[in-house]
Amino acid sequence: SQTIHQWPATLVQPVGSPLSLECTVEGTSNPNLYWYRQAAGRGLQLLFYSVGIGQISSEVPQNLSASRPQDRQFILSSKKLLLSDSGFYLCAWNPGQTKKETQYFGPGTRLLVL
Amino acid sequence: DAKTTQPNSMESNEEEPVHLPCNHSTISGTDYIHWYRQLPSQGPEYVIHGLTSNVNNRMASLAIAEDRKSSTLILHRATLRDAAVYYCISRSGNTPLVFGKGTRLSVIA
């Protein structure tokens, strides 16, 4: 069966520090991968998605970036965190072949920027 | 993705059925209707999806209007564990799911 992992689970970082969040999927190959962010009390915002290694689509301009160095690994990064980067970061995947594919979410990383 | 409209919040008594409405008047003929829910401090989880016919699974039922401009998620017997934000999403093409604000369901014991 497929599983999705995210780490760390929680993170407290000072403003201006770098960020690296990792997401890995097991039990499938060539998944579509997604990064979402949810600010406190707000809805889910799609940040990036990837349909293959090295292929990244950005949904919103910001100081974050994403990379997919391996088929089942998706990394969210920042060189300098802002206070507004605080939130709940969720990685998700789906087989991605049709419109009816279920999207599966990881447990999330709660980031607090101080 | 076609825009969906849901009530901001709903309330239900425990053990009673809940009908969560969703309007998607601009849906195209090939778009699927997906429902997800997000429990507190967790990521969203899949509930159900459908195209034209009503669908049932162990979690819920999905009733889709004949003109497909609206649908209703039905929880047959609400429990306290069903308290969550429920998202109705119309997905066009092989695109990422785009979440709106959803409906916050409160269940009263």
Image: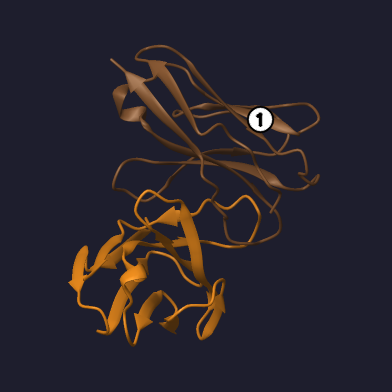
Three-letter code for the amino acid on which mark 1 is drawn:
Ser
User: In terms of depth relative to the viewer, which is nearer, A86 or B80?
Assistant: A86
Q: Is residue B17 above or below residue B104?
A: above
Residue at screen point 31% across, 59% down? A108
According to the image, label 1 marks what residue?
B71
Circle 1 Cα neighbour tier, 10 Å, few/some/many (<14 / 14–19 / ≥20): many
Q: Position of residue B21 (x, y in %)?
A: 60, 27
Residue at screen point 54% across, 72% down? A60
Q: Secondary structure at mark 1?
A: strand
Q: Chain of mark 1?
A: B
Residue at screen point 42% across, 11% down? B16
User: In terms of depth relative to the viewer, which is nearer, B93 or A82?
Assistant: A82
Residue at screen point 76% across, 33% down? B68
The chain coloured brown in the image: B
Q: Does the image show residue A46?
A: yes
Choose top left, top right, bottom left or bottom right for residue B104: top left
Q: Position of residue B53 (x, y in %)?
A: 70, 30
Q: In the rendering, what colour is chain A?
A: orange
